[in-house]
Amino acid sequence: MSISSRFAVGIHILALIELNKEGVTSSEFLATSVNTNPAVIRKLMGMLKKAGLIEVHPGIAGAKLAKELSCITLFDVYKAVNVVKEKELFSIHESPHPDCPVGRNIQNTIEPLFTTAQLAMERILRNVTLEDVVRDIASKENIC
């Protein structure tokens, strides 16, 4: 299991909207870059729009960012595309055997560790902006 690919695709969509701002960034165009179905892209774009990260208009092809690159963090994207619920990045198995010493205690032992790990990851995501991502892509592609 891993975090839903919606997170990576959400970042991909936003970065491509920025890097293609002179062109028309339609769901078909984005789907080609992501190598997925345009319906998947439209669903994610709806989530990004609801979170206030992009502007799209029904019947008009294209999208644009609703905020400056420096104002969109990876945490914003993470939350927008519903990757996981709060404190639920890691699942704990249900109903371990109560007669086993590990079964009796495993959930209470590892749950705080999992919560701490998720909060640490989210803190890092809050400190990385879409501007950082786009700048890195642009430097790798020699785009000014």
Image (tube, rainbow, N blue to C red):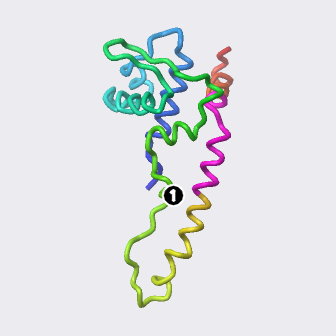
Quadrant of residue 55 within the rendered picture: top left
Measured as percent of width and height from the top left, residue 124 is found at 65, 46
Q: Nearer the viewer, residue 48 or 136?
A: 48
- Residue shown at the point (63%, 41%) measured from the top left: 126
The magenta stretch is 118-133
Residue at 62% x, 43% y: name it: 125
Mark 1 neighbour class, 10 Å CA radius: few under 14, some 14 to 19, many 20 or more = some
Q: Quadrant of residue 30?
A: top left
Check if residue 107 falls in the magenta segment. no
Q: Residue at image x 37%, y 77%? A: 95
Q: Return the x and y of residue 27 as percentages of the image width and height.
A: 38, 22
SS type, badge 1: loop
Report the magenta stretch's main SS. Answer: helix
Point out residue 15 in the picture as x, y percentages from the top left corner.
Answer: 55, 26
Number of numbered discs overlaid on the protein picture: 1
Give the vertical position of 18 relative to 4 (above or below): above
